[in-house]
Image (spheres, grey):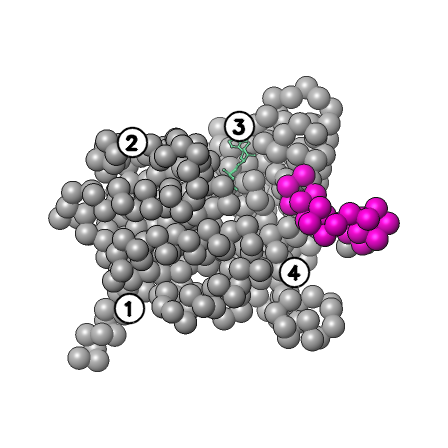
Amino acid sequence: MTEAILVLNAGSSSLKFALYDLELAPLCRGDIEEIGRANMELSGPLADQLKPYGSPPEHADRDTINAWLVANLRKLPGLVLRAAGHRIVHGGRRFRGAVQIDADVLAELRSLVPLAPDHQPHNLAMVAAVAAQWPDLPQVACFDTAFHRTQPRLAEIFPLPRALTDAGVLRYGFHGLSYQYIASVLPDYLGAAANGRVIIAHLGNGASLCALENRESVATTMGFTTVEGLMMGTRSGSIDPGVVLHLILQEKMTAEAVARLLNKESGLLGVSGISSDVRSLEASPDPHAAEALELFAYRVIRETGSLIAALGGLDAFVFTAGIGENSANMRKMICDGLEWAGLSLDFRRNAASEKRISTEASKISVLVIPTNEEMAIATNTRQLICRKAAQAQFSQ
Ligand code: ADP
């Protein structure tokens, strides 16, 4: 018998899952990159046991795929699930940490759908699929926003009329599970300096920066929604709000068209006119591709300057996620723009994507740390079920 925690990360177009044993050793990892395409990547010791069940059904909708996945996981011989942990994008103001899902929590999470319409419904559909297969299994919500609830009030509020702030128009911040994971492993890389002033650059299709002190978030670049802050694959990041007004009032664009433009047609894709993908842009001879990459780096450099001011200095800078972990070229452009801050890149170490890519003389340590959001979810889930079990024993 293998006791396990199931981890589910239902994104806007992808579905990732993982199984961990109760010591948090990985048993299996799966990735359905594009919902509706009959393709699934599997790895880990249990992967061979899942392979005979085949690929997800082609052209199927999300509910069908969710049901297919949980039904197949249920068939794994000897597997006994102890809990399921879900990535839930939005926890609003109420949830400052992981929480076991009950009817009251579920109602609150549903009420947050308008704040994350591209993600929250998929997250909650997965909760329903698991409940249909295992009605009594404890399910735990792990939030992308919770890590940032340590931000001081001034970092969290917008200079808008107070009534809007009171109504919850705040800087929630996102990518919190990635930041939580990196914060948890920072001492392995930095020792006691892990508790100093650190900026983590999560640079993937979605991208943001987080400033940490004592390994807690004190400021971040994403805001009320995931469109604020850095330039991203297809999202604009921060722009003059006057542009939005111009598009609606002068260009007569509908709100839906502006939302699509800012979320799906801007960023690397919009500036290059070629692709949202850094690998494709780095391979392209087109000057628009080069300009898109330079603008991406420039935005990271400027936002980093702002976070250094919020921190009052900087001790370490961490690159993570697809671009941060893999693009030596992007890391070099960003580090070159931060030399003024005392950051000095070792070119050989950077080209080899070593763990520490700064020179020995650099005042700021520069690290490359692979993120692991699934591990953060598994850790939160295990902590919560262990705490509940201890409480139950204590009250007996
Ligand atoms: P998501 O936010 O969807 O999880 P990822 O963290 O997987 O995104 O990052 C995707 C980005 O990482 C893409 O722009 C991709 O081109 C880039 N990337 C992945 N591998 C490399 C590589 N070897 N070199 C340059 N860029 C890479």
Residue that badge 2 annotates: 54
Residue placed under numbered mark 1 in the picture? 387
Upstream in sequence: badge 3 or badge 1:
3
Separation of disc 1 and disc 4 at Cα? Answer: 35 Å
| Coordinates of residue 24 in the picture (x, y in percent) | 28, 50
Secondary-structure class at tag 3 = helix
Judging by the rendered image, the residue that carries numbered circle 4 is: 310
Residue situated in front as seen by the camera: 377 or 371:
377
Query: Type of residue at label 2?
Result: Gly
Q: Quadrant of residue 223?
A: bottom right
Q: Is residue 75 left or right of residue 349?
A: left
Query: Mark 4: few, some, or many residues within 10 Å (few <14, many ≥20)?
Result: some
* Distance between mark 2 and mark 3 Cα atoms: 39 Å
- Mark 2 or mark 4, which is nearer the start of the sequence? 2
Looking at the image, is mark 2 or mark 1 nearer the viewer? 2
Q: Is residue 201 above or below residue 113?
A: above
How far separated are the C-alphas under marks 4 and 2? 50 Å
Q: Secondary structure at mark 1?
A: helix
Q: Residue 331: which disc?
A: none
Q: Position of residue 189 (x, y in %)?
A: 43, 47
Tell me residue 222's x, y (percent): 61, 54
Q: Verify CB contact (< 8 Å) between mark 1 and mark 4.
A: no
Mark nearer the N terminus (2 vs 3) = 2
Residue type at mark 3: give it: Ala
Does residue 278 show up magenta in the picture? no
The residue singled out by tag 3 in the image is 351
Q: CA distance from mark 3 to mark 4?
A: 30 Å
> Label 1 amino acid?
Arg
Amino acid under label 4? Ala
Q: Residue at x 19, y 52 (%)?
A: 80
Tell me how far mark 3 sits from mark 1, CA to CA: 44 Å
Magenta segment's dominant SS is helix
